[in-house]
Amino acid sequence: MDHLDGNVLAGPSTDLFAFDPTTTQCQCQSCADIATLGQAMVYGQPMGFVARCRKCDNILIVIVERAGQKSFNMRGLRWLRIADHARNDRISAED
Amino acid sequence: MTSRAIGWLTGNLARAHPLTASARSITFTVPGWPGNDAGQHVDVRLTAPDGYQAVRSYSIASTGTGEEIELAIDRLPDGEVSPFLVDDLELGDTVELRGPLGGWFVWRPEQTQPVQLIAGGSGVVPFIAMTRAHASAGSSVPMQLLYSLRTPDDALFRDELSQPSATARTTWHYTRTVPSGWSHSAGRLTADDLRNETLPPEQVPLTYICGPTGFVETVSHALTSLGHAADNIRTERFGGT
Amino acid sequence: MAVFGGRRRDDNPALPPGQYLTESFPVLSAGPTPSINTEDWEFFIHTEAGQTHRWTWDQFIALPSEDISVDIHCVTSWSKLGTGWRGVSLDTLFAEVETGFDFVMAHSYGGYTTNLPLGELLNGRAWMAYEYDGDELDPEHGGPARLLVPHLYFWKSAKWVRGLVMQSEDNPGFWEENGYNLHGDPWREERYA
């Protein structure tokens, strides 16, 4: 089956995140590859979006959209890293 | 322009014109549209009277601020949504739109890397937005397009891409039929074509490829074997319906 | 004003609710098509007693097989009528299997899973199919062999099947875990959980 690119996840994930996850870095739970989610390979259309690691095919994210409900499974993702525009990155232990 | 609208917006068909025998440009007025970067896409949702819904993603040909967006839709023979958008949708009709979407397959005027665009068929649409953004920003970054299509009649936006004022040069490549007097014979893009007609690895270009899955697959593999780093290649495949 | 109709949903009595008729054979999979050599292929049924019944490809195709003509229904709304298959009945494969469990998890090469009630795999309702339309089953459509459970939505007819594991409860498989119905009867439109 033809697959698509991770870019296509931007639509179904709009209501889930306050940011666009397709531009974030993420790490594959299985092979530790670090890539942008937009580089993932997406299968499963039109039943759902099955995003797999570009290196090892491990399933990173599954999204199933239907009227009135959205199921989001992050089974194969170790982390997502979001860039923001904060300037002060000191952490204080005191109030 | 990283903002995006929440939920589904209503798009009202404001203008439309045929691009080829099978493709049509459709421009919607979308109240609440926050503007979009070049290369972003939008999800289009249609609802039948019995409640049945179909959603498809389309690249946006327009770019910048403003509440209008232009899409260029190619009719797929067995398609469900594209024949409706190409043949049936009338001025004043509305569709639901979600977007702008995607921040990965985009080009922003502040980027400094040379840019190679490679389109297969209607995969040229996001590159129309990129060449428009390049021209309107007056960018001095080299940008060029290699456009692979079946026959001369299948060209989308030929006049626009061929304008003397275009700031990105287009190289045309035909896979089935070539114009008379064309020096290159018809055929699929080969590794040699890519070596001769795209920016070389030494210039470290950022290469964007958009088209059907098989096309994107072949071209991206050929580029990595020519010596381009995988992280300098961005792809957008489109599926079949 | 143009009215969107979607694909024509027929009144054909052979079509379950919400389905349209297709002549093509659309391909849907949750991952890349695995390439499986029949020399390395194996099929197994594993029971709660720890017993594993195994078949090599040669043993499998030497089993009694039958021609099957059935309608198939995909949850993505297409249906295809009168499809022709050749395969081994699950009754044959379960003939020697002793189990007290009522449910089955089908496992495929590539990692796909789907859950089924054992009762719906028996009594001539399910097969391991290895030919489609007179030819060996194309890898895209599940070859060398796939489950064929035509009375349920087609995601239950797992492609590239390598084994069935008995389970005491109806634990969800891949799509079922992500919001699709545990059972998937097209005539009751059991699409989602």
Image (cartoon, coloured by chain):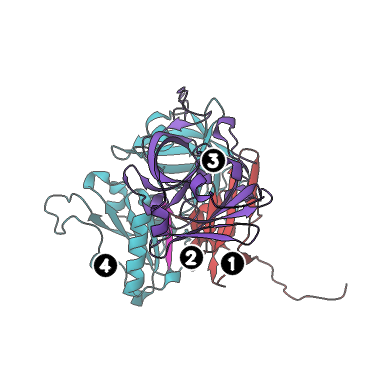
Chain colours: A red, B cyan, C purple
Point out the stretch of residues depicted in magenta.
Answer: B233-239
The residue tagged 3 is B97
Closest to the observer: B112 or C142?
C142
Question: Which image quarter holds the N terminus of chain B?
Answer: bottom right
Task: Name the disc covering residue A54, or none.
Answer: 2
Residue C98 sits above or below residue A31 on the image: above
Q: Residue at x 47, y 33 (%)?
A: B13
User: In what quadrant of the picture does the C terminus of chain B appear?
Assistant: top left
The Cα–Cα distance between marks 2 and 1, rounded to whole angstroms, is 12 Å
Residue C90, which numbered label?
A: none
Report the residue at 60% width, 36% height from top.
Answer: C190
Q: Which mark is residue A26?
A: 1
Main secondary-structure element of the magenta-colored stretch: strand
Kindly identify the amino acid type of the residue bearing the numbered disc 3: Leu
Label 2 sits on what residue type? Arg
User: Is there any visible trace of residue B167 in the rendered image?
Assistant: no
